[in-house]
Image (tube, helix red, strand yellow):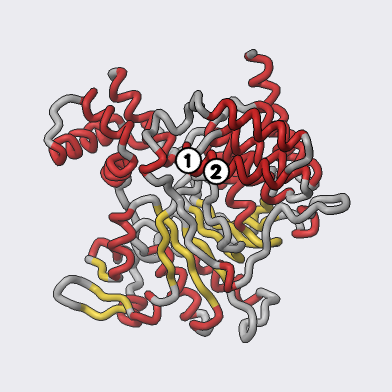
Amino acid sequence: MDVVTRKIADLIERSIGLTVASMGAATLKRAVNNRKRALDITDDEAYLQKITVSFMELRNLVEEVVIPETWFFRDQEPFNYLAEYIHKSPKDCSVDIFRILSLPCSTGEEPYSIAMTLLQAGLKSTSFFIDAVDVSSRSLAVATTGVYGQNSFRTKDLQFRDNFFHKTEKGYSLNPLVRGKVRFVRGNILEPGFLDGMGRYDVVFCRNLLIYFDKVAQAQVINSLYELLVADGILFSGHSEAGLFLGGRFAPISHSRAFAFRKKEREEDFLATGPGKGKFFRTTTTSDLKTAPFFRRESHGSASTLFAPKPKELDEFANAQKMADAGNLDDATRLCEKCLRQSGPSAKWYHLLGVIHDSQGRADEALKFFRKAVYLDPSNAESLIQLSLLAERAGNIDSAENYKQRARRIQEKG
């Protein structure tokens, strides 16, 4: 692979975690050529410059390399176990609402299969809700129409198609009741702030995603999935990914070929200890739910400048540090936020905000900012150490040790 193509692949990997090995060099080349033709660009170097300065074009390229391959009730056993789990759940279905996440949801077949499973299991439509997330706007556009061709129906038993679809000139159109149970959101689980403010889920389907990521991204996704689940929540993985969840914070569920896991720790294990310390995870109510901005706006600058410190910020940053050291935490916070609005994401500003919030006993906010700092600057040993301390304080020993080891490796490299 030539240098320019390698740089394009690296931008895609930083954007959505997809490695060139998993997407295939031929797929990447074909996608780049398609976008070059669309823009009337003939030179690879010129196209690299384009996606470096335009997040919109980077999104367009992502759309080209993300190829949906799914169908209704793909692998039946996860859905069989979901119905079994719902029946055995201690939740009062007349009062409580089951919250379910499908990630990635592609063109919608999986989340709609979940909805049909719950309705067929006897659950009232008012007793559950499904969030479905994908990085591809093109796939989500297909999902929201709810109209599918023959290729989406590959199972032997098609009774569900007779029950929930009607034939039209364009294909099979899904029942509006089922469509209304799914909210589609464009998002990227590797982005800072992923699903912030949208609460936690009783069940998460995350199948056949981790196989496309490297080990670092896999660990990040697994941590995010853990945090997205309620205490004792259920996770469904792909069969080739199941081994990644063994021996950690998930316990395998004994149901053949469901590839289901239960979150091990109880919620109270994740309360920060000591006076003034809050929960690692914020509990949300229905009124709190909102769609988070999963992608940075282009006005923040180019892909290459997003991560670079700007000289004019140096005095402001020194001032913010002095304010924080002097105990003027509110003023320091306002200055940090102002500079972030003006200059875009910055690891050092996020780290300082993390320190400020932690000193005020806001562990959940501190956690968020330290993670953003590490996302922008993976070699930020100081933020990794702070994350280790927060995890240790919350009783999450595995995560604490993981952060410590990462920080130690960085410090040893000098």
Q: What residue is drawn where x is 61% and y is 66%?
A: 202
Q: Quadrant of residue 264?
A: bottom right
Q: Is residue 210 above or below residue 117?
A: above
Amino acid carrying label 2: it is Lys
Q: What residue is drawn where x is 34% and y is 52%?
A: 136
Q: Name the residue under label 1.
A: 342
Q: In which quarter of the image is residue 339?
A: top right
Q: Name the residue under label 2.
A: 338
Q: Which residue lies furthest to the top in this view?
A: 414
Q: Is residue 240 above or below residue 106?
A: above
> Do residues under tags 2 and 1 come within 8 Å of each other at their CB atoms?
yes
Q: In this view, does 73 lie above or below 16?
A: below
Q: How crowded is mark 1: few (under 14 residues within 10 Å), some or many (20 or more)?
A: few
Q: What element carries label 2?
A: helix
Q: Where is residue 182 in the image (x, y as percent from the top left)?
A: 43, 70
Q: What residue is drawn where x is 54% and y is 67%?
A: 289
**In the displayed structure image, the side of residue 204 where residue 389 appears, left or right:** right
Q: In 3D space, how far apart are the residues under numbered discs 2 and 1 (Cα atoms)?
A: 6 Å
